[in-house]
Amino acid sequence: MIDARMQLALNGGGLDLPDEGRIAVFQPPVDADLEGLPVERCLIIHDFKPYFDAWAARGYDVAHSTKDRYAAAIVCLPRSKVEARALIAEACAVSDGVVVIDGQKTDGADSILREMRARVTVKGPVSKAHGKMFWITAPAADFFADWVAGPSQTEGGFWTAPGVFSADGVDLASALLVEALPEKLSGEVADLGAGWGFLSAHILSRPKVQTLHLVEAGHMALECARHNVTDQRARFYWDDAVTWEPPHRMDAVVMNPPFHTGRAAEPRIGQAFVATAARILSGHGDLWMVANRHLPYEAELNKRFSFVEELGGDARFKLFHAARPTRARR
């Protein structure tokens, strides 16, 4: 974790942070302890709404993107190498001083260190807890200009961005769910965990859908969805689907819920999505859902709905239709 490496770097490891000015901290782990960094000088950059809210609750200033210049910047490496490079390029562009890179070996810290050393002088590294922290002190924006990456169109014509789920193309599970959606889909519909909008675009091909509510925790993913879903019936919410409060009850929910926040599968996330669907649906509402075949969602579905049926799928994914939520009252 960044906690231990930061202390080593600041206490004899050779890292000197400026005494004044704001410090931009890009995507720190939600449970990180930033001891040694003054809370009042830190700006946490996080576009994932649950983590954004968690850092704000701890008293930090939080933003989903950078807007100013900073005295220093710290980048916590994400899993996606393209996204990691883009964050480093952005940090170098907005920092007037040191740019610190921190990450686990499993997140590609060694690879990023080698790539940066091939371009600029890198100080450190400090190694601890299966990760590395290293930094550059000279202005380096020009050396990483080719690492800048943002939203772009795929071959299929959809807009995606580095770090967004299924950034390289259509997710196979979502494509399977699209084929199972009924033509009669109508009324008020919610797409929970809408991502960059693939499911939503197809939901809106149903003429009887009155309003589609796209709920997505990733700010960049939602911005991509705004490019991909231009129908006037669409409403966009940067929010955690698990806690989202709709303006009124939904007639249908469609979802391909996430099943991990790290590397290991976490079925509790999908189970929480099922509970949310039951909470926001009308008494006669319908849920249409796809999931990885190995994930245990059947018990939660049967707990929350009076009617549950598996619609088939394939070797990797299973499709569900559930109706008449048993816990529809708030």
Image (cartoon, grey):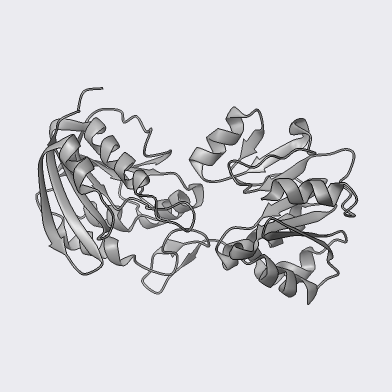
* Residue 53 falls in image quadrant: top right
Quadrant where the image shows the C terminus: top left
* Depth order, front residue of 66/180: 180
Q: Residue at x 86, y 69 (%)?
A: 121
- Taking the image as shown, residue 144 lies to the left or right of residue 121, namely left
Which residue is at a point 15% across and 59% down the rendered structure image?
180
Q: Seen in the image, is 261 located left or right of residue 133?
A: left
Q: Residue furthest top?
A: 330
Quadrant assignment, res 19: top right
- Image coordinates for residue 132, horizontal then vertical, percent: 73, 60
Q: Please count the marks in the image.
A: 0
Which of 152 and 82 lies nearest the eye of the viewer? 82
Q: Would you say residue 96 is visible in this rendering?
A: no
Residue 198 position, x and y percent, is 32, 58
Left or right: residue 251 versus residue 247 is left
User: Residue shown at 30%/43% (left/top)?
Assistant: 271
Q: Nearer the viewer, residue 203 or 114?
A: 114
Which residue is nearer to you in this view: 269 or 59? 269
Asked if 313 appears above or below 236 in the picture, the reply is: below
Residue 78 visible in the snapshot: yes
Q: Where is residue 43 drawn, in percent x and y? A: 70, 39
- Relative placement, left or right, of 58 versus 102 is left
Q: Is residue 40 above or below residue 84?
A: above
Task: Look at the picture and state if 217 lies above or below 262.
Answer: above
Whole-percent x and y of residue 16?
A: 89, 49
Instruction: Look at 51% across and 61% down and name the residue there.
Output: 151
- Residue at the front extreme, as displayed: 129
